[in-house]
Image (cartoon, grey):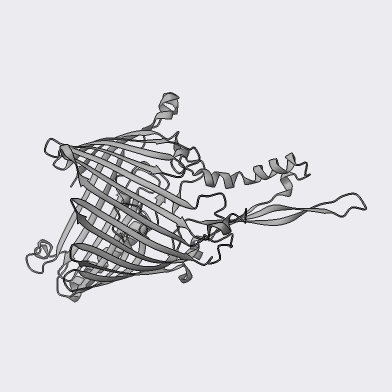
């Protein structure tokens, strides 16, 4: 059965193109001449890829064939586009042999009115100049339910329904505004998955940890005395207009430098988790009064609103392709003392790439966030940011080398989390001939077992894939 989002998107594409073609005299898809573009300029195209792949985890291999799976093997994607001088429409879907075999990736309609553009649909946008995970790239939340495909940041982005207006003036300047009417947080793997984050697992085990602590202190509390409610905003709540986001971005070129300035109002996609407490009464023999101890009664999830002011810069200097971003993210916790709200923080990114000897290309990017009012966090043990570092720094290194007239590419990427001292290493070999590619790649995790990457040190994997694009 087709996924309902796919059906909606297909109908959305079909009628939108029909609307533009009828209103501006482009005819219909039944007219073969119009499809070819010989009369009206209307063109229709279909593209996609089909891939056969196998992936296995090294830990499973070590435990024998009865513990080893190689995945679903097949995957693919299809993209349909229709365009005319005044408008274009696009729909892209991914196809996998799962319970939901067809999933909407992107779908939109764009109208061209001179220097003015209007666009609406499900989109993945990129703001900022950074190669990946830049602080200004805030429109789409990220999907961390698996770390098995880091070849393209777009694979991590979650398409959102949005409206975008843009206006070009001069030769190199553009201003654009984006409105996103609903909210989607970043996604994590479900409980029981090998990619389930340890931080979430710790919340699941909170009840057991509390019992263990009180029993060690000889406090007479039983499992029946602790009832922890999980409070999360549901999808209906996140679709309300008070969760809407909007942004404005201006880009221009001055000399050889590309500059961007943006303002964005939205919500942090990482949840803020606050623990609520109730008082548990422990009767004491007379004449002593009862003793009360705090017991967690709820885990409350929220998504903090914030304002972002940012600037980015890109330029070629002395053979280096340089990219930089800086952002100030201002939350509602201007005193730093609210336990349920993340503190305001600064974020920056700096990176470059350069061709080295023997045809090797080297790329490096450093991303960092710096928490403001950090001294206020340490005074509250129940603060969402308690026991965390003031800074979070990630450095990404990428080395690539092409051989045999670019038919063979050797690539190695390293994602290093500085504070925790953990990392992910992603090597790959890709052979490409025309529309066919064969890839052998892997993912290896090391470092602190409580770190962002080190916690997955049992998830080292290897993957091979054959892909045909059309």
Image-quadrant location for residue 38: bottom left
**Residue at the image position 35 percent from the left and 66 percent from the top:** 162
The answer to whether 7 is drawn above or below residue 426 in the figure is below
Left or right: residue 442 versus residue 274 is: left
Looking at the picture, tell me which residue is in the foreground, 389 or 99: 389
Residue 316: x %, y % from top left: 20, 55
Q: Residue furthest right?
A: 287
The answer to whether 431 is drawn above or below residue 37 in the figure is above
Residue 242: x %, y % from top left: 48, 70
Left or right: residue 368 versus residue 132 is: right
Residue 435: x %, y % from top left: 16, 43
Q: Is residue 352 visible?
A: yes
Count of numbered labels shown in the rendering:
0
Q: Residue furthest front?
A: 318
Q: Is residue 10 visible?
A: no
**Residue at the image position 71 percent from the left and 44 percent from the top:** 223
The answer to whether 61 is drawn above or below residue 134 in the figure is above
Left or right: residue 270 versus residue 377 is: left
Image-quadrant location for residue 327: bottom left
Image-quadrant location for residue 423: top left
**Residue at the image position 16 percent from the left and 39 percent from the top:** 359
Looking at the picture, tell me which residue is in the foreground, 431 or 315: 315
Looking at the picture, tell me which residue is in the foreground, 307 or 210: 307
Residue 10: x %, y % from top left: 29, 60
Looking at the picture, tell me which residue is in the foreground, 156 or 421: 421
């Amino acid at each position: 059965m087709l996924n309902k989002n796919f059906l909606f998107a297909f109908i959305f594409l079909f009628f939108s193109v029909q609307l533009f073609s009828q209103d501006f005299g482009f005819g219909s898809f039944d007219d073969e001449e119009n499809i070819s573009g010989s009369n009206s300029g209307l063109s229709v195209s279909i593209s996609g890829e089909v891939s056969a792949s196998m992936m296995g985890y090294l830990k499973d291999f070590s435990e024998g064939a009865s513990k080893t799976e190689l995945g679903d093997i097949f995957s693919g994607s299809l993209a349909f586009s229709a365009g005319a001088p005044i408008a274009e429409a696009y729909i892209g879907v991914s196809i996998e042999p799962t319970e939901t075999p067809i999933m909407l990736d992107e779908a939109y309609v764009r109208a061209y009115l001179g220097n003015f553009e209007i666009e609406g649909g499900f989109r993945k946008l990129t703001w900022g100049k950074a190669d990946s995970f830049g602080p200004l790239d805030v429109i789409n939340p990220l999907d961390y339910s698996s770390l098995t495909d880091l070849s393209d940041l777009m694979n991590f982005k979650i398409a959102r329904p949005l409206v975008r207006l843009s206006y070009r003036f001069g030769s190199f300047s553009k201003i654009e505004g984006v409105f996103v009417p609903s909210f989607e947080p970043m996604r994590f793997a479900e409980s029981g998955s090998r990619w389930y984050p340890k931080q979430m697992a710790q919340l699941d085990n909170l009840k057991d940890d509390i019992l263990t602590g009180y029993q060690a202190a000889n406090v007479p509390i039983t499992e029946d005395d602790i009832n922890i409610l999980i409070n999360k905003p549901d999808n209906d709540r996140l679709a309300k207009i008070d969760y809407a986001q909007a942004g404005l971005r201006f880009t221009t070129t001055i000399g050889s430098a590309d500059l961007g300035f943006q303002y964005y109002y939205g919500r942090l996609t990482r949840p803020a988790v606050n623990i609520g407490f109730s008082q548990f009464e422990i009767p004491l023999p007379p004449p002593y009064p009862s003793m009360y101890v705090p017991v967690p009664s709820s885990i409350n999830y929220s998504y903090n609103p914030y304002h972002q002011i940012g600037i980015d810069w890109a330029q070629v200097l002395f053979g280096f392709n340089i990219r930089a971003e800086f952002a100030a993210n201002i939350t509602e916790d201007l005193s730093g003392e609210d336990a349920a709200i993340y503190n305001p923080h600064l974020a920056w990114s700096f990176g470059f790439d350069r061709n080295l000897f023997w045809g090797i290309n080297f790329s490096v990017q450093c991303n960092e966030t710096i928490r403001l009012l950090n001294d206020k966090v340490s005074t509250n043990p129940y603060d969402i940011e308690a026991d965390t570092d003031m800074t979070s720094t990630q450095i990404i290194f990428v080395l690539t080398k092409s051989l045999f007239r670019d038919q063979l590419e050797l690539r190695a990427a390293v994602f290093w989390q500085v504070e925790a001292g953990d990392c992910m290493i992603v090597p790959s070999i890709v052979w490409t001939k025309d529309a066919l590619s064969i890839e052998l790649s892997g993912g290896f995790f090391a470092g602190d077992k409580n770190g962002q990457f080190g916690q997955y040190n049992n998830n080292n994997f290897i993957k091979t894939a054959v892909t045909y694009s059309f």
